[in-house]
Image: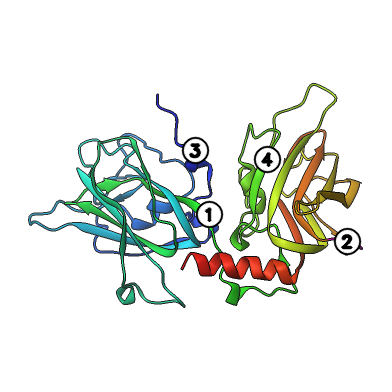
Amino acid sequence: MTAAPDWTRLPDLACRSVGGSVVWANDELFAERENLIRKPEPRYETYTFGLKGQVYDGWETRRRRDAGEDRAIVRLGLPGVVRGVVVDTAFFKGNFPPFASVEATAATGYPAPEELTGWETLVPKSPLEGDRKHHFEVSARRRYTHVRLTIYPDGGVARLRVHGDPVADPDLIVAEALDLAALENGASITGCSNMFYSDPANLIAPGQATVMGEGWETARRRDDGNDWVEVELAAPGVVRLVELDTSHFKGNAPGWASVRGRDARTGEEFDVLPRTRLQPDTRHRFRVEQDAEVTHARLDIHPDGGMARLRLFGRLTPDGLRVITQRYQDLR
């Protein structure tokens, strides 16, 4: 089996769990368009028939009797730079589309689907096979807010994954008070000791975790070490409040945790939060009484276990605001 490309480890900008939405489709007679961006992998149960036929965990249109094509538009939950697209036809074997293409556009505000213009090609019309993941690397390097999937002429697609780097709009940033570690503000995971059960990027995802699987969990350690994860903050800032959320982790929460800050420009390191005892299934919040600037933060959990969310609330420095603004301007 061919390994998935490295870019599939980047966040799925379209996923429902980060706020994505399938805002329009021209047809969804057999299976709802919303399935396209569900986070779980597609599932299939034999002989599960509804009033319109076999129930599929995906988006499926009716059989065309003309020369047209079918389309669905997704508003990205995290606008950003698209590095790659996955078109997954899992379990669609005799009813998959033979071709698909993907376009994208950048919109301001909250336009209706019919108001979107300026579509640019990310994936040209490309052949598909049934019941498999198709990986398409994207070379465009600009910020997008919406993508449009076109299938030729009809059929079913289980999932559409849009992997990339979130890019925040500086007009929506409050520099004096924001989560410096938030994925939606431009933070990213740069290192991790272990991700046996789940992805550490879940730690900095939007919203609250609703189940244990939406956090980060490591394997059980059988040595004297501990697990850790490092975050590159959205931009240089000063941390004022740390939130360590162990919600849903009851018999597998870490016993203790600490957060260490680093300024990559000077090499200086310092404690943001010293080693502190944690409770299971609890949102812990700790005030930080220091003014040191930080570009990276390392969360150490002792000895192992799971964490639902890591939040580092604070303020951007003037340089940090310039970084976010320049990043946005360069990708417009």
Query: N-terminal of the two: label 4 or label 1?
Result: 1
Query: N-terminal of the two: label 4 or label 3?
Result: 3
Q: CA distance from mark 1 to mark 3?
A: 13 Å
The residue at the point 81 percent across, 32 percent down is 226
Q: CA distance from mark 4 to mark 1?
A: 16 Å
The residue at the point 73 percent across, 57 percent down is 311
- Residue 20 shown left or right of residue 327 in the figure: left
Labelled pair 4, 1 in contact (Cβ < 8 Å): no
Quadrant of the drawing holding the N terminus = top left
Identify residue type, mark 3.
Asp
Query: Magenta span: helix, strand or loop, mainly?
Result: loop
Query: N-terminal of the two: label 2 or label 4?
Result: 4
Residue occupied by mark 3: 6
User: Front-most of 320 and 133?
Assistant: 320
| Residue 122 figure quarter | bottom left
Residue 249, image x, y percentages? 73, 43
Q: Which residues are magenta?
A: 287-292
**Vertical placement of residue 271 versus 104, above or below:** above
Residue occupied by mark 2: 288
Whether residue 170 can be seen here: yes
Labelled pair 2, 4 in contact (Cβ < 8 Å): no
Labelled pair 4, 3 in contact (Cβ < 8 Å): no
- Name the mark on residue 165: 1
Residue occupied by mark 4: 191
